[in-house]
Amino acid sequence: MNLLVVSKMDTASMNIASQLLINHDFQKTSERFCENPVYLRKLDNEETVKLFYIEQELVNTQSVAYPSPLRLLIFLSRHSSRSGTPTLSVHTPGNLGEASLGGLTRTVSIAPASSMKEALKAMKETQEDMRLDYQVSYECTHHGPSLNVPTMFVELGSSPKQWKDTRAAQAVARGTMDALTSEKSYSAVLGIGGPHYGMRFTKRALSSETAFGHMIPKFVIGELDEEMLRQCIFKTVEPVKKAVLDWKGIRGADKERLLSLLRKIDVQTERI
């Protein structure tokens, strides 16, 4: 089963969910979760998708008892930034360091690299088709929850104006459905370096068969160790044998130590 999770506290989350219910054939069921109605859609491959509403912020759902087993869990979420840049984004949750915004310290979720790539592609195509003035990008791994199932966030941001934008929410809804329905499997890599918004990784994913799982930003590299790197590699749905490095987006003082760690865990590297 696949699961979509919507927060009733989140304007963008509710907006994206509305577009899914309007445009993607979900049906209301007699089932309830957290005293809210549950919606269902059956996919062509006989998989099912359920849409749940919850009463709390999505980052704080570490202890929520979701049904199992799950093939894919997708959180529909707002994105916030100080710049307020209109953004459609996707990423895996989890904490590379301290758990400052939900989840568990030094624990990441399982990254569904191929599903995230499909969502990224669909959002970019829809953004272009609809001429939306939005940036489309990956984000690096961050915030809670930290779950042992393939988990991703699809996000609409970055300010209240965008959270209410129904056309942009349609793009995120389409990205969500493409992530759920595609059966493609891509070559997955670990991304390291650059800022929180992985624009070089985004460009690479949109122009090649490469899919990024976990992405580690420049400001975290100095705190990385072998254990955390291994976790990011093993907690990816697809096999990861290569790290793609945003070489100019890595501080000089961190480069040799990072390469040494990657050699220790027998991961190939490519610089972009």
Image (cartoon, helix red, strand yellow):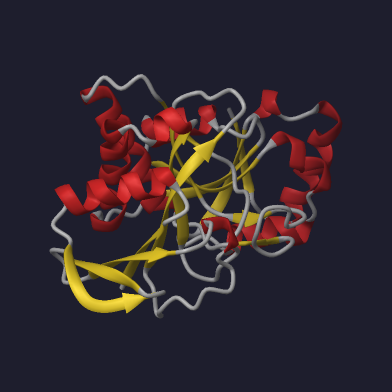
In terms of depth relative to the viewer, which is nearer, 25 or 198?
25
In the image, taking residue 32 as reference, residue 236 lies left or right, namely right
Q: Position of residue 16 (x, y in %)?
A: 32, 46
Q: Position of residue 1 (x, y in %)?
A: 31, 73
Splitting the image into 4 quarters, where does residue 247 fall? top right
Splitting the image into 4 quarters, where does residue 226 fall? bottom right
Splitting the image into 4 quarters, where does residue 245 fall? top right
In the image, taking residue 55 as reference, residue 142 lies left or right, namely right
Q: Is residue 138 visible?
A: yes
Q: Is residue 199 above or below residue 52?
A: above
Q: Residue at the location (62% across, 46% down)?
A: 268
Q: Is residue 136 visible?
A: no
Please state, as top left, top right, bottom left or bottom right, where the C terminus lies in the image: top right
Q: Residue at the location (52% across, 52% down)?
A: 92
Q: Position of residue 56 (x, y in %)?
A: 52, 61
In terms of depth relative to the viewer, which is nearer, 86 or 139?
86
Q: Is residue 34 above or below residue 4?
A: below
In terms of depth relative to the viewer, which is nearer, 98 or 188?
98
In the image, taking residue 170 as reference, residue 252 lies left or right, namely right
Q: Is residue 104 above or below residue 83?
A: below
